[in-house]
Image (cartoon, rainbow, N blue to C red):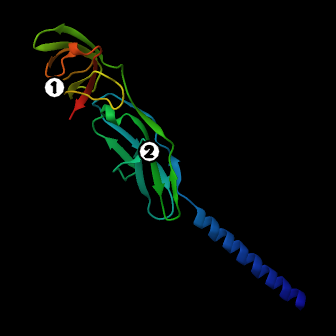
Amino acid sequence: MKTRQRARLLLTILMSVASLAISTVRLRAQPIIAAQPTNQSVLLGGAGSFSVAATGTGSLSYVWQFEGTNTTNTGPSLSIPVVHHADVGSYDVIVTDQTGSVTSSVVKLTPAGPRPIITLVTNTPAYNVIDLQYTVAPNGQFQLFVAHDLTPPIQWFGPAYIRQSGGASNYNWSYARGTNYTEYYPKTFWRLDPYP
């Protein structure tokens, strides 16, 4: 009789321990990312996007990060309608459910196509005329900025000029001189960026 009681007591203890172990595992569970976001290469002025697929306990929440800083995007997808230079970099997303959170792999958004080729064509008293050859998203508006030093923080002047663009093309852009005359500086750097 005592042997049966001891066996029942031992069985009850083992069941309690197993139940506690299962509960602990459930409490430590985290969302599972089923599909990671992937790297994107997008023409400047084009649209970029990232997405993630995850499963978890209860409702899921998402916080996308750019270069380690939280963004305002809180869904399973992140959309960038117009890609600017400032959007180029590293992205990840933190997925949270009732039991914890998990961070996706870090992915990159990079500009597609060759970098713009920018050369000074003429140097007139009132304007600097610049020739550009570039590959950007078609039918967008672009603006040209000028800097004289690429030491951070870079100070960009402009926009120098805004016009309708095409695809891969040559364009002449007129940069009206102001207080930052190009010839006053040993170097001049140009940047083409979508507008707005």
- Residue at image coords 29%, 13%: 186
Instruction: Give above or below for 191 relative to 106.
Output: above
| Quarter of the rendering occupied by the C terminus | top left
Q: Position of residue 139 (x, y in %)?
A: 20, 27
Which of the marked residues, 2 or 1, is nearer the chain's N terminus? Answer: 2
Lateral position of residue 28 relative to residue 137, left or right: right
How far from the left and from the top, in percent, is residue 163? 15, 24
Kindly identify the amino acid type of the residue bearing the numbered disc 2.
Answer: Gly
Quarter-wise, where is residue 25 in the image?
bottom right
Q: Nearer the viewer, mark 2 or mark 1?
A: 2
Judged from the image, the secondary structure of the residue bearing numbered disc 1 is strand
Q: Residue furthest bottom?
A: 1
Residue on which the image places disc 1 = 162
Looking at the rendered structure, the kind of residue marked 1 is Ile
Q: Is residue 59 above or below residue 125?
A: below
Where does residue 133 sit, x and y in percent of width and height?
27, 14
Residue 81: image quadrant is top left
Quick check: marks 2 and 1 in contact, CB under 8 Å? no
- At 30% from the left and 18% from the top, the residue drawn is 116
Circle 2 packing at 10 Å, graded few (<14), some (14-19), many (20+), is few
Q: Looking at the image, which residue is at 44% across and 44% down?
A: 68
Cα gap from disc 2 to disc 1, whole angstroms: 33 Å
Report whether residue 73 is seen. Answer: yes
Residue 8 is left or right of residue 159, and the answer is right
Label annotation for residue 68: 2
Q: Nearer the viewer, residue 71 or 44?
A: 71
Q: Is residue 192 above or below residue 31?
A: above
